Image (cartoon, rainbow, N blue to C red):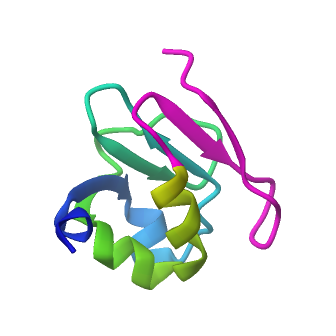
Amino acid sequence: MEHLTAYVFTTKGIVYHKQPILRVIYDNDGDWQFLSRNDTLDIKDAILVSLDEILQIDNSLFNVVFSLNKGEIAFRVSIGSQWVINKCTS
């Protein structure tokens, strides 16, 4: 599936330290960000991985990834919580 070969932005904490993914941003430019807290992606902590790798880290993301449209954000309070989808504010 071509969609899974996309590259996405995430943090070293998620990839190397298994921090939970609590925010997913699919911005208007078509870029993806997978974050663990409500902060912004800091360039010194940023890492580029495939969408497939993110789904292997947390396979519960599969439904939310395919539910988001460009310009939307999904967030949850903790792993296992319900995802909430809104329009991006920036």
Of 13 and 62, which appears nearest the observer? Answer: 62
Residue that appears at 75% across and 53% down? 76
Residue for point 39% across, 72% down: 54
Identify the main secondary structure in magenta.
loop
Count the numbered circles shown: 0
User: Which image quarter: residue 19?
Assistant: bottom right
Q: Viewed as shown, does residue 51 lie left or right of 25?
A: left
Q: Is residue 38 left or right of residue 25?
A: right
Check the picture and name the quadrant holding the N terminus: bottom left
Residue name at image x 24 percent, y 66 percent: 49
- Give the x, y percent position of residue 89: 56, 16
Residue at 48% x, 41% y is: 25
**Whether residue 90 is situated above or below residue 40 in the rendered picture:** above
Farthest residue to the top: give it: 90
Does residue 89 belong to the magenta stretch?
yes
Coordinates of residue 74 in the picture (x, y in percent): 62, 45
Relative image position of residue 29 (x, y in whole percent)? 26, 28
Magenta stretch? 68-90
Residue 3 vertical placement versus 37 (above, below) = below
Q: Is residue 8 above or below residue 13?
A: above
**Residue 86 belongs to the span the image colors magenta:** yes
